[in-house]
Amino acid sequence: MEGVGSGEMPAQNTAGNRVKWGDLSGLDDITLVIEDINARITTWRANMFELPRSQAGKDFVKEATRLLKLFNTRTRWEPLAINILLIFFPMMLQKPSARSKSKDHSRYLLKRLQSWKEGSLEEIISEAEVIQKRMTTSSKKKKEEGKVRGFSRLMMEGKVRQALRLVDADNMIDGVHVIDDEIRSTLEAKHPLAVQAVDEVLL
């Protein structure tokens, strides 16, 4: 960010529009980007690593402190500072994998901090979304594997009804389904219209 933390007084709208952060320019445009990122982050699963005790960790604390000061001081960044701080933590501390170590976290954090400084927010958020997608896929795979193991165990024990109930556990339909137009059309599409029987077929 340019001109940040200099203790400058609030600027007029024209001055505010001159605020730059990497390729981002103007408070209005930056606000839209921050709001979009915040909306995307709200769907994430909890996946933040502990702050490493390294230079990367110190740089993180320094940047977080600077953002907080921007919120408490009268600068052009004051209206945005707290919202930027809110996305800063999950973006910077996104754990790369379930088995990642502290040294991995330091390496990722340094790289993200550099991208953050350059205003390359989409680069950081895209990486984090790939991590989140991988987490969801892994969770679904484990759930399916657990269901298969449970089904096999119940069948081996002769508990057929419980095994079938386990397989159908995600089925939300209970009892007789109400026939509406959509279901009727689907059923009609699955069954061809009746035609006159052919003598050769009957023979």
Image (tube, rainbow, N blue to C red):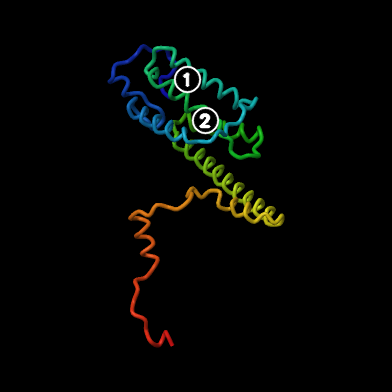
Comparing 145 with 150, the one in front is 150
Residue at image position (39%, 68%) is 191
Percent position of residue 128, x then y: 51, 38
Question: Are circles 2 and 1 on residues that touch, CB within 8 Å?
Answer: no
Percent position of residue 105, x then y: 61, 33
C-alpha separation, residue under disc 2 versus residue under disc 1: 15 Å
Percent position of residue 109, x then y: 57, 31
Comparing 154 with 92, the one in front is 154
Which labelled disc corresponds to residue 124? Answer: none
Residue at image position (54%, 20%) is 62
Q: Residues within 10 Å of mark 1 (few under 14, many from 20)?
A: many
Q: Amino acid at mark 2?
A: Pro
Q: In the figure, 2 relative to 44: above or below?
A: above
Q: Is residue 57 left or right of residue 9?
A: right
Label 1 SS: helix
Where the N terminus falls, by quadrant?
Answer: top left
> On the image, numbered disc 1 is attached to which residue?
67
Where the C terminus falls, by quadrant?
Answer: bottom left
Q: Is residue 158 left or right of residue 96?
A: right
Q: In the figure, 198 relative to 2: above or below?
A: below
> Toward which corner of the image does residue 70 lie, by quadrant?
top left
| Foreground: disc 2 or disc 1 | 2
Q: Is residue 26 left or right of residue 101?
A: left
> Toward which corner of the image does residue 11 lie, by quadrant?
top left
> On the image, numbered disc 2 is attached to which residue?
90
Label 2 SS: helix
Residue at image position (55%, 44%) is 134
Task: Please report whichever mark, 2 or 1, sits nearer to the chain's N-terminal start.
Answer: 1
Comparing 6 with 80, the one in front is 80
